Amino acid sequence: MPTKIEKDDVTGHMTTGHEWDGLQELNRPLPKWWVYVFLACVAWSLVYFVLYPSFPGITGYYHGLIGYYQRDAVDADVAAIARQRAGAMDQIKALSFAEIRKDPQLLAVAETAGRITFADNCQPCHGAGGGGNPGYPALAAGNWLWGGKLEDIQQTVTFGIRSGLDAARNSQMPRFGIDGILKPAEIQAVADYVATLWGLPSTGTDPAVGKRVFAENCAVCHGDAGQGNREVGGPRLAARTHLHGNDRATILAQINNPRMGVMPNWNTRLDAAKIKSVTLYVHSLGGGE
Amino acid sequence: MSFVGKGKPPVQPSEDSLYADRVRVYPKSVHGPVRRFKWAVLIFCLTIYYALPWIRWNRGIGRPNQAVLLDIFHERFWFFNLEFWPQDIFYLTGLLIMGAVALFLVTSLFGRLWCGYACPQTVWTDLFMWVEREIEGDRNERIKRDAGPVNFDKVWRKGLKHAVWFAVAFWTGGAWIMYYVNAPTVTVEFWQGGASTPVYLFTALFTATTYLLAGWAREQVCTYMCPWPRFQAAMLDEQSFTVTYQAWRGEPRAKGKRAPGAGGDCVDCGACVTACPTGIDIRDGIQLECINCGLCIDACNHVMERTGRPGWLITWDTLADQAAKAAGTHVPFRLIRPRTIIYLSALGLAAAVMVIALMLRPGLGLSVQHDRAPLYVMLASGDIRDGYTVKIVNKSPARAVFEITTQGLYGATLTEANESLGPAETLGLPVTGDTVGTFRIMVTGQPAALVDGSEPIDFSLRDTATGEVTVYHSVFMGPVRGR
């Protein structure tokens, strides 16, 4: 309680009696109606206290008269959003790609859903925006192994590559080096031949030998001129970019003991509408055919 | 005829309690030049407020014909010939800055003119007080009736007053809504019950606030709620031209009939106090509660005239001049002071920036955003391709085709996949009227044309209808040479 209420000579006001190192506070009384508004707010807050979960007990807590529970509210919101999206996602599932692309609004929904699905599932390997990583194809570049049409992409996403499913895309490159199919000199010669396809210098092997070895062993999958073969997923070699790397050491390693990537099948993890959405998104990254 | 204003100043609140009872203020009506000026400002402000939404403005087919329309639902602000989109919101920032600096300038020159004349709280309170005076009579009559018993006369006058207050408040709340939706339409819809819920809610909200703030809270808003009286002290100085009691002339004050020249001019009649809408005594000097309206000047002049003394005992003057006059000299009012020069240059600068920005505002809006990832992709051919998100603002009501091309990168070609456009050096992009068109544009560059990892590239957009051109500076990313 204040102890020394006195009149301030300068202003003629009374003090509150509070003093801090000689500083005193003038009493400028608050209007009473303001205090009543404050009290009304306090009373109103008690309504919340009674209606909503408000205080803890020993074994639980007071749930409030209306039984509000935040988790329920979130679940209701999530369900509401799912209902809101259901119409569009059902349409995406039912319509063909051509029909979806004719409807700009539906296409926008599909590409948004696809972008998020891609970020959650595909981005760790294929990079943000489909930029690719060594061993993981750059989807935005359009240098497709198995084809870049919407149906091709949908097939790849659904069943995967070398995923073990019968419907999956499957192919195998022989281990030319460690299985002794080619002699070391032939491997050096064919590596030089492949390197010169995109302008790397040769190390001086006989081009005729390299060309012959390529024609006999590689052309069936990689094409006569190294242009690739999408029927078997044979990568295009006569290009500036390659799946695993662009230097001679990578070529030699790949001939000797090839790395062959596996892409999981997504049909068990994503529903049909999401697979179509992510297909449309991947197609829109710049490489779509 | 009895001498006006024998009333005592309002009772000071009890000083030993932390809470004070409301001291009801019964302002007495005054007549004079200040009051006439205040009526003129009031009518001017209210006319603008109530009439502005009804002004029609022809903007062509498919566009609103209301001169001032803040169409939040469609994200457009219409202000006569100007049209603002959400991205133009910084003009509002500029306007608010100008408003604040102008307030500083006016306050440093002439005190709280805003508070006394133009503030909505003052204008509507004044209007409500006028209604009260017309129905319940002037100060003395109101005091007597309030203190008296409840009778028919009291009930019908109070009832009518509150009914009129409520009607004015409702008109005010309704007019507020008309700035946001088409005024004639919403007026009809409102009474047919077809207007949207927000229309009813905001009308109710502004009806309630107008009724409470102008009818009941009045000077309490200025004294207890408003921050402006608190920091006005930083704008005012001894050179500010404010409502001032000329103490050197008035003191020593004394009641009753005296010969002119005997004692001070102030006859201590209390007319200045009873006229004050905030219930203060101007003779105590500039204070937080004073809104600088000057009604006490009119009240005092009236008394000075009747008692045969020179007028303007309460007047507009500076503290510096008052100190000088007390010493028998005079200090002229200084319009030009460091403070006003600073405020004026800040105001001029803000206004110049706003006007120039408004004049140079392109009708054509273009924004180009380079993809964050991947920064670029190398194609099988060795070409480098970058992705951009291009947004084009079409402010015309009709569908228009915009030609986009690039400069700065030799041999660059553009592709838009969704519209199946390109590859070409120039693309024609269609955008429907009054919308923003979003396009994903791929730019393919020849590696021979690239020098470094990042090249500047300009996107230029041409409106094929008007020929207007705008340019957006961006970058083209590629591999760093030698890697």
Image: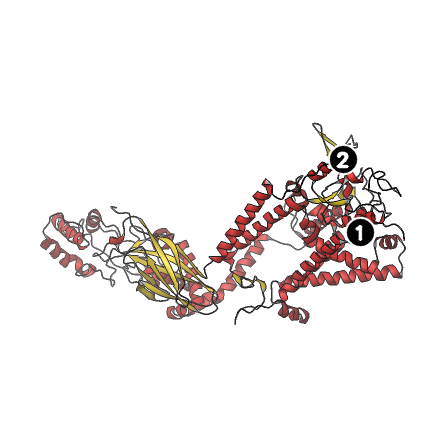
**Residue under pointer 1:** B27
Q: Position of residue B447 (x, y in %)?
A: 26, 53
Q: Quadrant of residue B329?
A: top right
Given residues B328 and B241, the one toward you in this image is B328
Q: Residues within 10 Å of mark 2 (few under 14, many from 20)?
A: few
Image check: B362 left or right of A247? right
User: Which chain is home to disc 2?
Assistant: A
Image check: A179 left or right of B449? left
Q: Say if A191 sits above or below A96 in the image.
A: above
Q: Quadrant of residue A227?
A: bottom left
The image's colour scheme reads secondary structure
Image check: A174 left or right of A114? left
Q: Amino acid at mark 1?
A: Pro
Alpha carbon distance from label 2 to label 1: 25 Å
Q: Position of residue B376 (x, y in %)?
A: 32, 53
Q: In percent of the image, x 20 and y 46: which residue is there?
A: A249
**Secondary element at image label 2:** loop
Q: Position of residue B216 (x, y in %)?
A: 76, 53
Given residues B58 and A261, the one toward you in this image is B58
**Residue under pointer 2:** A11
Q: Amino acid at mark 2?
A: Thr
